[in-house]
Amino acid sequence: MSNFPKSPTSISGTSIQTVLTQTNLTLRSILKNNWPKELDRHIDKEIYTLSKNKKIKWSDISKCWNHEYEESKRSIFKLNFFYARLYYLCASHAHEKGKIDDTWIFLFHSIHLIGFLEGYKHQKEEKQFNEKRASDGGKEKASKINKIKGKISEILTKPPTKGWGSESSIAEHILNDQEFKDFIASIKAEETIKDLKDFIASEVALNAQNQKILKNIRSKTKAARNTES
């Protein structure tokens, strides 16, 4: 049923035949979208055969599908589709025999389950969307952090005139460096790291690559001073 649920005014006066047709089209669409390899006639025949059973087992339900799909063996979605289709088929046969009350009763149960199927689908899509957004957000944050690390290493290769002092003073220097501030703004990472000074200090003191950079610079500075003296 397109645009389900419908407003009361849009369904007022709808004939039972129209409801049957709409229900059928909706269920066929669900079948095609979720189990595209199945043939309508075959699955309808298999499902309706079970209409006389007082108790229907999972093994009976699973046999209605001819192909395997990527879903759990006891798929709640498949179970509810099975019963929605079963109630529709019973409604259709009851209507052919002129049993209007039975037709409406079966249709009621079928439409109720269609509502579940639509809600289940929406919930699943919403979950996938949120997971993707969280994943994309995590990847974006990781990318920004790696860029910041790279910028810190780059700045370390360009010491001030008097050379680098203590690790804490280096962290302070980088934090207040205008080039670094502009870089953070350019990649919109102002809120990416909660304590940026602590992060810089950690990168300076604990990052092996940065320690190697500092060691080389200090060695060159020391050599230059010895030459001057």
Image (cartoon, rainbow, N blue to C red):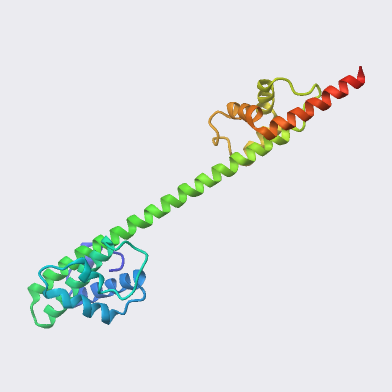
Above or below for 141 versus 106: above
Determine the residue positioned at 26% across, 77% down: 43
Relative placement, left or right, of 143 versus 59 is right
Determine the residue positioned at 23% across, 72% down: 23
Which residue, as the protein is rendered here, is positioned at the far front? 59
Q: Position of residue 109 (x, y in %)?
A: 16, 66
Relative placement, left or right, of 224 versus 152 is right
Which residue, as the protein is rendered here, is positioned at the far right? 228
Determine the residue positioned at 33% across, 55% down: 123
Residue 89's image quarter? bottom left
Between 1 and 229, the residue placed more toward the observer is 229
Above or below for 227 versus 182: above
Q: Position of residue 192 (x, y in %)?
A: 55, 36
Q: Work out whether residue 188 can be spotted.
A: no
Q: How many numbered marks appear? A: 0
Q: Position of residue 63 (x, y in %)?
A: 25, 73
Determine the residue positioned at 59% across, 39% down: 145
Quarter of the figure that contains the N terminus = bottom left
Above or below for 20 versus 154: below
Between 48 and 223, the residue placed more toward the observer is 223
Residue 102's image quarter? bottom left
Which residue, as the protein is rendered here, is positioned at the far top? 229
Residue 197's image quarter? top right
Between 102 and 85, the residue placed more toward the observer is 85
